[in-house]
Amino acid sequence: MVVDAQDDIIIDATARHGIKASTVAALGASIYRKARQSAGAAGLGDTAFLRMEAEYGHIFAAGRGSLVLIAVAKSSVNVGIVRLEMIRAAAGLA
């Protein structure tokens, strides 16, 4: 999903059956936004990638400018590959 990082509005999304895209988009964008603010306040610079691990899977977020790319995956996913691909994809966001 591509989400506006300020308003949590979905710009583009494809979600598998059973995923509540609007809820996941709002959660992912909100967590990413707070992580960016916190990292900046701590003097760590911009947040490049974020992963939230939950009981049944992961929510990943990577952003550029005012857009954030959100992905959902099962617990068994290869996190390293997802991280690389998300950072690469986020670099292409306008």
Image (cartoon, rainbow, N blue to C red):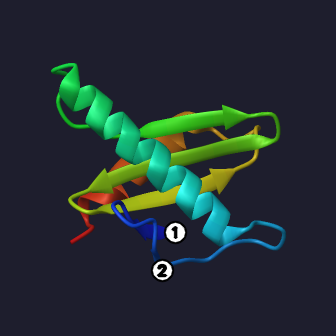
Q: Quadrant of the C terminus?
A: bottom left
Q: Secondary structure at mark 2?
A: strand
x, y (%) of residue 24?
A: 63, 59
Point 75% across, 46% down: residue:
74
In the picture, residue 42 is in which quadrant?
top left
Q: Which residue is situated farthest in the top direction here?
A: 42
Point 15% across, 21% down: residue:
43
Q: Badge 1 is on which residue?
A: 1
Front residue of 41/32: it is 41
x, y (%) of residue 69?
A: 43, 60
Front residue of 17/11: it is 11
Depicted 31 relative to depicted 5: above or below: above
Determine whether, in the image, residue 10 is placed left or right of residue 16. Answer: left
Find out whether the residues at labels 2 and 1 contact each other: C-beta distance under 8 Å: yes
Could you tell which of marks 2 and 1 lies nearer the N-terminus?
A: 1
Q: Is residue 84 visible?
A: no
Determine whether, in the image, residue 81 is placed left or right of residue 91. Answer: right
Point 25% across, 66% down: residue:
92
Q: CA distance from mark 2 to mark 1?
A: 6 Å
Q: Badge 2 is on which residue?
A: 12
Q: Amino acid at mark 1?
A: Met
Determine whether, in the image, residue 75 is placed left or right of residue 13. Answer: right
Tag shown at residue 46: none
x, y (%) of residue 17?
A: 82, 73
Q: Residues within 10 Å of mark 2 (few under 14, many from 20)?
A: few
Q: Amino acid at mark 2?
A: Asp
